Image (cartoon, rainbow, N blue to C red):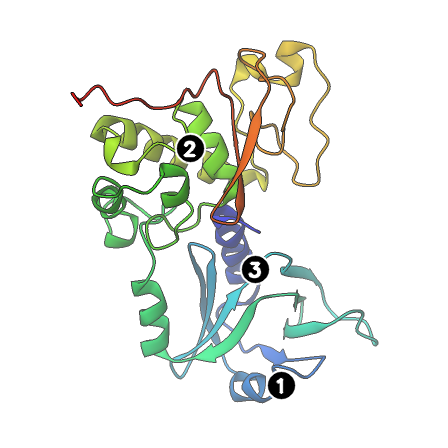
Amino acid sequence: MPEGHTLFRLARDLDAAFVGGPVRVSSPHGRFAGDAAVVDGHVLLGAESAGKHLFLEFEGDWFIHVHLGLIGKFDLYPAPPPAETVGQVRLRLLDATTYADLRGATQCDLIGVERRDAILGQLGADPLRPADVPAGDPERAWGRISRSHRPIGDLLMDQAVVAGVGNVYRAEILFRHRIHPLRPGRTLRRAQFQAMWDDLRELMEYGVETGRIDTVRAEHTPEAMGREPRKDDHGGEVYVYRRTAQPCLVCGAKVRTEVLVGRNLFWCPRCQPVFRSRAAG
């Protein structure tokens, strides 16, 4: 599933391509045709992401709300589009120079301000938002994590706690800070959480700029270690994500995996030891 940096980057690209002028809005395969007609030819005021959600704001207080889900893609191309549309294009944006096609999304809905605000109100803090605005305030996430018995590996994937983090960033941030994914959230120290949050913000901002998730430090790159680059559909150099039974790049122990709330965890048993409370029993 695309993670928060992908949506942030997509919003930025859509904003640059279409904002400020009238946009033709259509639904080549017809599923969104009625709603598309409502905003067809209207001015696009802005494209903005929030966690894994995308909002396209049109004049008249209308928003197209998109959630890409597991396989969704929203790609931009030079105009004009081909005479025959290939594949199931649910939404198309078009102006004189660019068109963008949405395929495979879980959600594509035309909504108003109240619904948009309700969706935003359900999201946790977003590391890609400025820390001085409520949507990016890490205290919102820390308040939930510090009171929870749930595993930190579960909490980081809960979009009501931290918006935009998916399985890759979850696995990698926990490895980088030597925290076992099953450790209860309430056992983390405030300094540990802040260090993870700051690191997560930096990694996701890098992802926005490059379109990749690269999490290994300089000393663990293929060039530094004399190893082959990672070959994976997701791209990027990582420590543990989808590296089950492969040697840890730091200590050599075999990376482990386990299912938690329907998603695979990945961790190194040596670098991320099981948490044991020092409190008296």
Amino acid type at image mark 2: Pro
The residue mark sitting in front, 2 or 3, is 2
Q: Secondary structure at mark 2?
A: loop
Instruction: Please give the residue where the numbered disc 1 appears in the rendered image.
Output: 33
Instruction: Please give the residue where the numbered disc 3 appears in the rendered image.
Output: 69
Quadrant including the C terminus: top left
Amino acid type at image mark 3: Gly
In primary-sequence order, the first of circles 2 and 3 is 3
In primary-sequence order, the first of circles 1 and 2 is 1
Q: Is residue 78 visible?
A: yes
- Residue at the spot 69% in from the left edge and 10% down from the top edge: 226
Instruction: Please give the residue where the numbered disc 2 appears in the rendered image.
Output: 181
Give the total number of marks visible in the rendering: 3
Residue 256 appears at what percent x and percent y? 56, 27
The residue mark sitting in front, 3 or 1, is 3
Left of 91 or right of it: where is 280? Answer: left
The residue mark sitting in front, 1 or 2, is 2
> What crowding class fits label 2: few (fewer than 14 Cα within 10 Å), some (14-19), or many (20 or more)?
many
Q: Residue furthest right?
A: 84
> What crowding class fits label 1: few (fewer than 14 Cα within 10 Å), some (14-19), or many (20 or more)?
some
Residue 22 appears at what percent x and percent y? 54, 78
The foreground one among 13 and 241 is 241
The foreground one among 166 and 270 is 270
Q: Is residue 265 above or below residue 97?
A: above
The Cα–Cα distance between marks 3 and 1, rounded to whole angstroms, is 21 Å
Q: Is residue 41 visible?
A: no
- Residue at the spot 36% in from the left edge and 39% down from the top edge: 151
The Cα–Cα distance between marks 1 and 2, rounded to whole angstroms, is 44 Å
In primary-sequence order, the first of circles 3 and 1 is 1
Q: Are marks 2 and 3 in contact (CB under 8 Å)?
A: no
Q: Secondary structure at mark 1?
A: helix
